[in-house]
Amino acid sequence: MNQAAEAPDARTQLASVVFAIILIDPAGIVREANPAAEELLGSSAVRLVGRGLFDILLIADPRIAEALRSTDGQMIARGLAIEVARRERRVNLTCSPVAGDPGWRVVTLSETGQEDEDRDAERIELRAPTVLAHEIKNPLAAIRGASQLLTRRATARDRPLTQLIATEVDRIAQLVDRMQQLGSAATVVSSPCNLHEAIRNAVGTVRTSRGNDVEIVEEFDPSLPPVLADRAALEQILINLIANACDAGGEVASPRVVVRTRFTGGLVFNAIRLGKVTRLPIEVSVIDTGPGIDPALREHVFEPFVSSKPQGQGLGLALVRKLVRDMGGRIAHERDDRAGLTLFRINLPVAPKGDEK
């Protein structure tokens, strides 16, 4: 008769949890922090333990902060604004008392968007542009054909008007194509990919299209292993983010865009994909010195048709998020107002050992 396998110890279990878990004592001092907490708080457990929770993070809502200090009961706060290491984040927070140990509490933190519980809602959200695009294409084709007939019959005085119709129809058709791409359910085929080659190709494309009006700086960790990604999709993602960063920098003197890569040193993000935990230790950040996205739009920056640009369509970042998620990765946006920086961070899985492509 087979013996039951021995269960992992509590510390190993905590280290495997995808959300940040912090144990605080009755005085509000951190006594334990799992690897996810190290990543979210930007510090190792050795440095976190022994410090007060409110010395590590600042909570914008004073009511939540006071409740967290004083309550002995359970508490849940969603979409809570906090400041960690001088950076603003928005998280979901829970606080639970430890049974049998008065004053001791377990606090969990997860960045909004880290969970995939909204995937069904997102699929519905992305399906709408596809349906709309399909319904628009047929009348667009008819209008385009009619404008061509009118151009042949129009006088020289009226021909610019018919040409304007054709130009605007083509512009709308391009928008429709992007809407269909956003709602596409095409399978992404990921394989080992050299991240730095993909970045350099993307940077080259952006520089070719706009010149050298913005300084683009590469800060690479040369020791990074290949990532698991769709090479074409990854380059499309990077071109979009780098071009957006250059556009944002155009509003300031001496604009600068930094593309940075790093291995998170064991402090990894996790994403729940297809019922399993995926480790995402490879990080690429696109950082610009522009004024940042309108604060009113920051929480909706990856939603379709949301844009801070006067002529923006609001599809670029929505498509970026879709492509990143289709590859099993994660993307987040941050604004560091003190440093005057806007950051888009992508986390990707390491490719299994094999040939690099």
Image (spheres, helix red, strand yellow):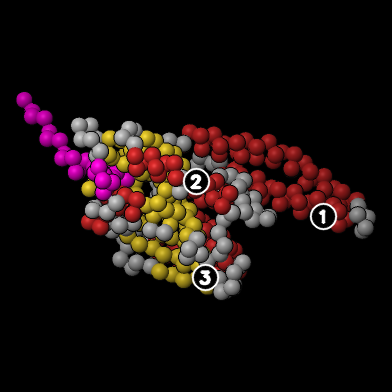
The residue singled out by tag 3 in the image is 256
Q: Earlier in the sequence, mark 2 or mark 1?
A: 1
Label 2, label 3: how far apart the Cα atoms are: 27 Å
Front residue of this view, candidates 287 and 43: 43
- Look at discs 2 and 1 and give the one toward the viewer: 2
**Of helix, strand and loop, which one carries label 1?**
helix
Can residue 345 be seen in this snapshot? Answer: no
Residue carrying label 1: 163
Location of residue 336 with respect to 40 vertically, above or below: below
Question: Residue 341 location, x and y as percent?
Answer: 49, 63
* Residue 19 sits in quarter: top left
**Disc 2 to disc 1: CB gap under 8 Å:** no
Q: Which residue shows up at 61% across the image and 39% down it? A: 129
Crowd class of label 1 (few under 14; some 14 to 19; many from 20; radius 10 Å): some
User: Neighbour class for label 2 at 10 Å: few (<14), some, many (≥20)?
Assistant: many
Q: Nearer the viewer, residue 229 or 106?
A: 106
User: What stretch of residues is rendered in magenta?
Assistant: 1-30
What count of labels does the image hold?
3
Which residue appears at 92% of the width and 58% of the height? 156
Residue at position x 68%, y 36% from top?
135
Badge 1 vs badge 3, beta-carbon distance below 8 Å:
no
Q: Amino acid at mark 2?
A: Lys
Image location of residue 38, percent across then percent down = 30, 53
User: Which quadrant would the N terminus be assigned to in this image?
Assistant: top left
Q: CA distance from mark 2 to mark 1?
A: 35 Å
